[in-house]
Amino acid sequence: MSQFRRRQFLRGALAFAAARWIPCSYAQGQRVYRIGYLITNSVTDPATGSYWQSMDQRLRELDYFEGRNLQVERRAAEGDLDRLPALATELTARKVEVIVVGTDLAALAAKKATSTTPIVFAAGGDPVRNGLVKSLAHPGGNVTGFTSFREDLVGKQMQLLRETVPQIKRVAAIYSSSAPLGLDALKAGAEGLNVSLHDIDTGLDNVLHAIEREKPGGLHVLLTASAFRNRVRIAEFALARRLPSVYGIAAHVEAGGLMSYSFNYSDSFRRAAEYVDRILKGAKPSELPVQMSTKFEMVINLKTASALGLKIPQSVLQRADRLIE
């Protein structure tokens, strides 16, 4: 082979090798999808971060890779709900093809910002009552996703608390009047118990002071955005007052609460990624039914149980999906 041909061959081989390694976004004709994440809390929050990482992972499994064929615009309100509308508007201005949200509040902000850009919620509450969709089977607009709430879960959480602490007589319950999911079910499920209700929207300090005065035998924290943000403080309060506590999301237990029974939120975010994939491939949100999350989990913090001097019944331990030690 002549020196000229050898140089040509080497240049061609190097070019071929480089083409295999360069990001696809730089390859001629490769489409790059742009999506937006509207995040209610901070991505540095361990629980919030893990949920969105679950979505990222599922997108990679579906062949979407940042830096190659995917660009993700992330906007986090850092727990300041008043920032959500402006962040939603900012994502719309960035011409994203899909906006993904994790909460009803973020979904409502996104829907107000755009009536055309598809919106997928990963862990909604009651999207029909909130006005996000016309019906679960036929959303009818630019919003769809996965709801991670069922009224009967609240009753099961209360049953779990009573099974764990049979002698309990009085329970304090924290809820949100701005999003009273599960409140009716709580009242029904607490039959036979003296339950006092505390609206966290009046201020966490006020709520905790009121509960401390009442000296209940247990604490039931419904799923609320404010309680989620303040889960460490609530868990520390319950432990200091020796209150067995039950929650509507595992993140509270990871923060030191006693137990939870809820949907698996990481699984919900993974399934939402599949809706993102379908929309990017041409599906319309109005034609994708809102689905109920299907994976549940019971989580128990054994370290907290020990600190409370509480022996978890074997019948409860055997049903737990995860034990924190």
Image (spheres, helix red, strand yellow):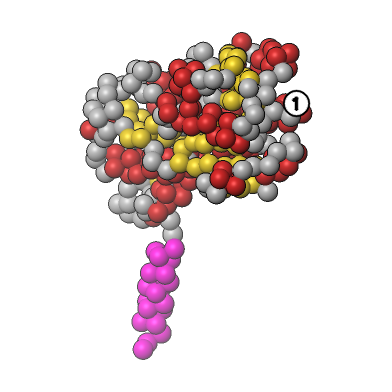
For residue 207, which quarter of the picture?
top right
Q: Quadrant of the N terminus?
A: bottom left
For residue 219, which quarter of the picture?
top right
Give x and y (percent) for residue 20.
40, 65
Residue at the spot of label 1: 241
Give x and y (percent) for residue 235.
68, 30
Residue span colored magenta? 1-21
Give x and y (percent) for residue 51.
51, 40
Q: Which residue is depicted at the point 29% across and 39% down?
A: 279
Position of 230 with respect to 109 (left or right) is: right
**Element on which disc 1 rests:** loop
Q: Which residue is depicted at the point 37% across and 53% down?
A: 63
Q: Nearer the viewer, residue 207 or 95?
A: 207
Residue 89 in sight here: no
Q: Which residue is depicted at the point 60% across and 47% down?
A: 314
Label 1, residues with CA under 10 Å away: few <14, some 14-19, many ≥20: some
Q: Which residue is depicted at the point 24% across and 38% down?
A: 283
Q: Which amino acid, by three-letter code, is at mark 1?
A: Arg
Please state the total of marks drawn on the protein image: 1
For residue 138, which quarter of the picture?
top left
Position of 220 with respect to 12 (left or right) is: right
Q: Nearer the viewer, residue 183 or 3?
A: 183
The secondary structure making up most of the magenta span is helix
Q: Nearer the viewer, residue 101 or 303?
A: 303
